[in-house]
Amino acid sequence: MSKSSALASVVSLPIILLLFIVLLLGGCQQNRAVIIEAAPADRVTDQPIVNQPAAALPTALPTLLPPVASPPGVAPLPGASGANPFGLLLGADGINDQYRVELAKALGVSYFRPWYVNVEAWNGACYDLACALGPQAGLKLILTARNNVGAAAPFATTPPQDGAAYRRNLSEILTLYQPEVLVVENEEDSAQYWNGTPEQYGALLKAACQVAHDQKTACANGGLSSKTTALLVWAAYIEQQQITEACSFVQRAGAVLAPDLCRFTAIEHLSAEDKSALEIGRQLLEIYPSSGQDYLNFHWYVPDKNALSEAVNYLRRATNLPVMSNELGQNDQSPEAVQKLLSAAADLKLAYAVWFSLDRDPAQALQNEDGSLRPNGQAFRQFMQAHFNTVAELPALPTPVPSPTSLPKFTAKPAPVAASGQLTFSQMLKDVTYCTVGGVELKMDVFAPWQPAGPSPVVMFVHGGGWVAGTKSGTPGMSYFLDLARRGYTTFSIDYRLAPTYTFPANIVDVKCAVRHIRAHASDYNIDPDRIGAWGASAGGHLVALLGTSDQSAGWDVGEYLDQSSRVNVVVDLYGIHDLTTEYVVGNVRGLDRMVFRAKDPTDPILVTASPVSYITPDDPPFLIMHGDMDPVVPYTQSQILHDRLLAGGVSSVYVQVHNGGHGFNAIGGPIDPPYATIAKTILGFFDEYLR
């Protein structure tokens, strides 16, 4: 394939404007692990205050008493309002945000839990419209605030880099949404969600709770996981030599504890993984009482009422804090499980109990993908009616709104082998060197599929960041990596050299080298070298589009593994840049011309050379292109241009314009259409269509 050259320009801009553009284009700064120390409530400061260690707590209870409805010694529940403590985190494919809230209201709850607010990336609005729609419908928020999701792993956060900025952003969030309870992070005992030490989490929790109390908002920890909570209860029995009781608890908590624990008579018998989880749980229990939190929050997926009672009473006695759960759920669709857990939560007088209604391992939702109730959802509603008389008429099932562009009809295929347990990224390789250029080691992370049936198809993800920022581990696209693993894909998320230190074509040279590395090591990764898809967003969308349209004649296949092809089989391009001779940043701001591409003026041929539309030929792979029609950074016309040129060039292309979608598909002016769940299903189905 021969491919062209030429036109473009540079208008010098103040550096501050360039940096603003870069941040809008999706740039992410790497986050250093800096502990936030809590500051006095009447001032904001970055100066650390030495935290006094919490008083030592017993590692086991004197005795695990039978459950009681209102344990003695538990303080009144500050902030708990009304007789109905129940809430919902509710989501499903095929229903929009308004319907989520209306269905929650119809199910009779008092509280709504939106997904979360990202504090470090706070830009004045919660990306989950339920943050605003919930209170408008009369539902109070149980709001989870996470510092920087995806900074360390697909869903993990790291301690904030700037303590004052964290407190300032959090204060703005609480002022805007006024939640009933602020929940700080999520499952801080799990490396999947928190990439810091318990001590760092304790400092963050103390700072966040001080901000919350300044806003007269109650505060809770992120939520001890089911497994850690159950291990703590089991260990308490073991250390009191109550072996029979310990085994009985294991049998009733079998949803989260291994049956082997019934044979163990000492903590030393635990696996290294369980010992570590137990130790982290105990450290956190020592931290909570001195953090200033109002509630101890835990998660629970065990349907046995007595097991839940034992867990709640253990947590109360270990910390003397009122107990809540912002994540109660079930791993099946049994109506009986719903009734048992709801009645136990009510009997135990949990301050708040939020049901997790989403089909996500290990949870099962109350509703189907179209919003209709399953039998467990009907049981939930019946319970609320019988106990609180708070249910409303069920909303009419949402009618799909036609998208501005007809959606493709890709049919997702089942995973080749079902997971045998909770899917995690224990099979993740970090910081693999894929190529070395001029002494610079280029790194990627590898996410292997769960129990692959054979050599797997590949998705290579290329991050955004305006070509000058971003990392392989700090990208929103990582939220899809678990779904890809479930479907049997191996996912590679790559770094590449960034401008202005390394200008074009360094970035595309690196991306092509990554593809060649993957092919050269196909047997090592157990992948199929003939089924490789490329996926990128923003600046990453530009690079994967170049990857899909250009071949060796472009001159970018240099360096290692030159016996391998850098061509790919399919491309997913989200809000990318495709013709740099046109307006590729809203307002036609041209400062990146020089910073990234070394263009001397708007007619410099390098801008044609760097444009994916310059290389289209009929043998290019199929493209899925998605772009928001309200994108304030990259004009959606960029994607329309690429789509039109691909079709004219005889290449298969599907273009989905996301109504009300901003850059990154954040909602601007109203709910996005299609919604996030449909966008995800479309992307994953597209890969299934061509790679499986």
Image (cartoon, grey):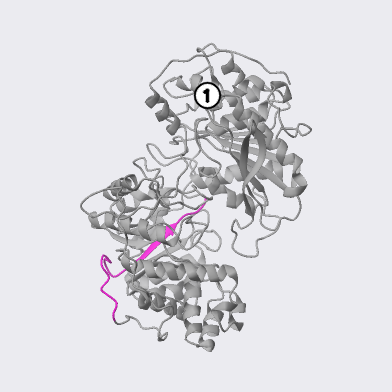
Lateral position of residue 680 relative to residue 79, left or right: right
Q: Residues within 10 Å of mark 1 (few under 14, many from 20)?
A: many
Callout 1, which amino acid?
A: Val
Q: Magenta stretch: residue 178 in it?
A: no
Q: Residue furthest left?
A: 42
Q: Position of residue 509 (x, y in %)?
A: 65, 29
- Indicate the quadrant where residue 53 lies: bottom left
Residue 691 to residue 275: above or below: above
Number of marks in the image?
1
- The main secondary structure of the magenta stretch is loop
Q: Residue furthest right?
A: 563
Residue 300 shows in this picture? no
Q: Magenta stretch: residue 84 in it?
A: yes
- Indicate the quadrant where residue 313 lies: bottom left
- Indicate the quadrant where residue 179 lies: bottom left
Q: Looking at the figure, which quarter contains the N terminus?
A: top right
Query: What residue do we see at 40% from left, 46% from top?
Result: 161
Badge 1 is on which residue? 596
Lateral position of residue 563 relative to residue 406, left or right: right
SS state under label 1: helix
The magenta-colored residue range is: 73-93
For this rendering, which residue is in front, 460 or 292?
292
Query: What residue do we see at 52% from left, 47% from top?
Result: 677
Residue 260 shows in this picture? yes
For this rendering, which residue is in front, 195 or 481?
195
Q: Position of residue 549 (x, y in %)?
A: 67, 26
Q: Position of residue 401 (x, y in %)?
A: 48, 41
Q: Position of residue 10 (x, y in %)?
A: 47, 15
Residue 608 to residue 461: above or below: above
